[in-house]
Image: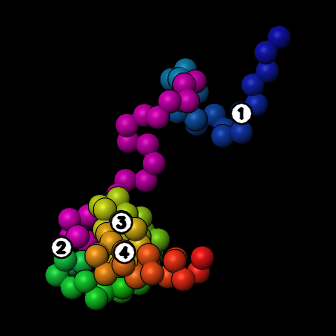
């Protein structure tokens, strides 16, 4: 004997269609209208902008800006995504002083 607990009510689309698969389907989740290219252009135009400033300009959460920049391979905080030669030298010097 098999029992099913319906916690979503009888309007569950998957139940109506008989789809019990847990695989991702196209169009699931909240659609995004965020423009990654506009963010990238803003950062390249003025690299002194902070993620907070960008979040305010794009009317999104700061975490969204950080996540999108990471996806684009950009970083505004000197993280390992883009080390300059000076960054590398400074980090090497600091690490060797600590040891």
Q: Secondary structure at mark 2?
A: helix
Position in image of residue 27 (x %, y %): 38, 42
Q: How many marks?
A: 4
Q: Assess disc 4: are there few (<14), some (14-19) or many (≥20) residues with their C-alpha within 10 Å of its C-alpha.
A: few
Would residue 62 be counted in the magenta stretch?
Answer: no
Q: CA distance from mark 1 to mark 3?
A: 46 Å
Residue 35: numbered disc: none
Q: Residue at x 18, y 73 (%)?
A: 41
- Given contact means CB atoms under 8 Å apart, are the residues at marks 1 and 4 in contact? no
| Label 1 or label 3, whichever comes before in sequence order | 1
Q: Quadrant of residue 89?
A: bottom left
The mark lying in front, picked from 2 and 3, is 3
Kindly identify which residue carries mark 2.
41
| Label 1 or label 4, whichever comes before in sequence order | 1
Kindly identify which residue carries mark 4.
88
Q: Which residues are magenta?
A: 20-41
Q: Secondary structure at mark 3?
A: loop
Q: Secondary structure at mark 4?
A: helix
Q: CA distance from mark 1 to mark 4?
A: 56 Å
Q: Residue at x 49, y 82 (%)?
A: 94
Is residue 73 placed above or below 31 in the rendered structure?
below
Residue at the top extreme of this rendering: 1
Position in image of residue 22 (x %, y %): 55, 30
Residue 65 located left or right of residue 8: left
Q: Residue at x 25, y 83 (%)?
A: 47
Q: CA distance from mark 3 to mark 4?
A: 12 Å
Kindly identify which residue carries mark 3.
81
Q: Residue at x 23, y 70 (%)?
A: 40
Q: CA distance from mark 2 to mark 3?
A: 18 Å
| Label 3 or label 4, whichever comes before in sequence order | 3
Kindly identify which residue carries mark 1.
6
């Amino acid at each position: 004997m098999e029992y099913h607990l319906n916690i979503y009510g009888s309007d569950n689309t998957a139940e109506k269609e008989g789809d019990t698969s847990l695989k991702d389907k196209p169009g699931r989740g909240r659609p995004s209208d965020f423009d990654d290219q506009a963010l990238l252009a803003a950062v390249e135009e003025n690299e002194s902008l902070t993620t907070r400033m960008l979040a305010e300009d794009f009317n999104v959460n700061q975490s969204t800006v950080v996540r999108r920049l990471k996806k684009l391979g950009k970083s505004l905080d000197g993280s390992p995504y883009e080390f300059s030669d000076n960054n590398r030298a400074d980090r090497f010097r600091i690490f060797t002083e600590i040891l």
